[in-house]
């Protein structure tokens, strides 16, 4: 077994142990781990740009403090803070839904342009500006992905992250071994020279497997009477006809594609800045951002999907008819 693979396996084992410990500790553990992950990816992102100012690195710390204060007020004064948090969430709902969608489309466009033209593409100049890129990539997507558990003391947000983590782990693992075994044709030589079409296809398969396993486990082990989310899964995924039975495949495929472009987009940022890895904190993997890049795209997409499913379920429960 090669040295790098041994390092990858050992580091992955340590990361899984840390994740298991955070889950065991509950909301405190999840919150601390989320903030730590957010601060790590922020620091690594801004460190890739050699002339990046200290102010840009400090802003994510301020954002984290704001979320921590919200977490503390929600924990100790829920009757006062929760209505305020819900009001802010309702006001920012369009941003939560639209910004990740448009930024994902922008990332896909950037990857397509650079893969077609090379680093001479016009979008490269825009991606070289870490000011506006950091606002959307780190401040907004990063906050939605890693800091949202601090706003709600419920298991539902952590379950969203669990879906995302499983999809990213399965997708990366399937892509790594599938590409290593069967990879011949390169899919993005101008961005990621080692990425093959076989790795892409195996990564998509891994995403479908991850989501299918998660949903089936949820349907068996959750409290049916007290979990609205599981009722939605029962009714709108497993309950009626072939379309709903195929939902894990459709959603898993979409999330797999989103994860692939999330990984590719971070590779593009590294290539523009002339670095191999975002950091060296994780032996065999590189930096924290190298491991969590896909999560920045997958989790916001999952949140938007569950919102849409919830809205459809509520409308279908109303007396004037059904949408699906």
Image: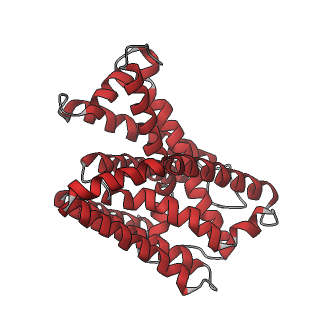
Residue 303 at x, y percent in the picture:
43, 45
45 w.r.t. 199: above or below: below
Q: Is residue 220 left or right of residue 229?
A: left
62 and 167: which is toward the camera:
62
Residue at image x 31%, y 24%?
A: 234
Say if residue 182 shows up in the picture: no
Residue at image x 44%, y 51%?
A: 168
Residue 311 at x, y percent in the picture:
42, 31
Residue 28 sits in which quadrant?
A: bottom left
179 and 91: which is toward the camera:
91
Residue at image x 20%, y 29%?
A: 224
Looking at the picture, the colour scheme in use is secondary structure
Say if residue 103 shows up in the picture: yes
Q: Is residue 134 left or right of residue 124?
A: left
Residue 121 sits in which quadrant?
A: bottom right
191 and 199: which is toward the camera:
191
């Amino acid at each position: 077994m090669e040295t790098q693979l041994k390092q990858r396996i050992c580091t992955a084992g340590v990361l899984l142990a840390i994740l298991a410990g955070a889950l065991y500790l509950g909301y405190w553990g999840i919150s601390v781990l989320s903030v730590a992950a957010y601060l790590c990816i922020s620091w690594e992102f801004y460190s890739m740009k050699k002339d990046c100012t200290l102010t840009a690195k400090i802003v994510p710390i301020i954002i984290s403090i704001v979320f921590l204060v919200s977490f503390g007020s929600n924990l100790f004064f829920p009757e006062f803070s929760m209505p305020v948090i819900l009001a802010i969430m309702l006001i920012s709902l369009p941003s939560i839904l639209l910004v990740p969608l448009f930024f994902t489309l922008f990332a896909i466009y950037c990857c397509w342009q650079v893969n077609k033209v090379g680093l001479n593409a016009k979008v490269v100049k825009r991606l070289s500006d870490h000011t506006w890129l950091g606002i959307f990539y780190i401040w907004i997507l990063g906050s939605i992905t890693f800091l949202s558990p601090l706003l709600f003391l419920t298991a539902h947000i952590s379950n969203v992250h669990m879906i995302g983590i499983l999809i990213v782990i399965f997708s990366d693992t399937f892509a790594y071994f599938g590409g290593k075994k069967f990879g011949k044709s390169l899919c993005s030589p101008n961005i990621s020279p080692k990425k093959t079409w076989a790795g892409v296809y195996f990564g998509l398969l891994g995403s479908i497997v991850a989501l299918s396993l998660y949903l089936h486990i949820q349907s068996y082990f959750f409290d049916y009477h007290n979990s609205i989310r599981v009722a939605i899964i029962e009714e709108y995924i497993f309950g009626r006809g072939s379309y709903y039975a195929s939902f894990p495949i459709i959603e898993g495929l979409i999330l797999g594609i989103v994860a692939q472009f999330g990984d590719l987009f971070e590779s593009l940022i590294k290539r523009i800045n002339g670095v191999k890895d975002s950091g060296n904190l994780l032996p065999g993997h590189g930096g924290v951002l190298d491991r969590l890049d896909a999560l920045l795209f997958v989790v916001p997409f999952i949140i938007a999907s569950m919102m849409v499913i919830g809205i459809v379920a509520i409308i279908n429960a109303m007396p004037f008819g059904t949408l699906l």
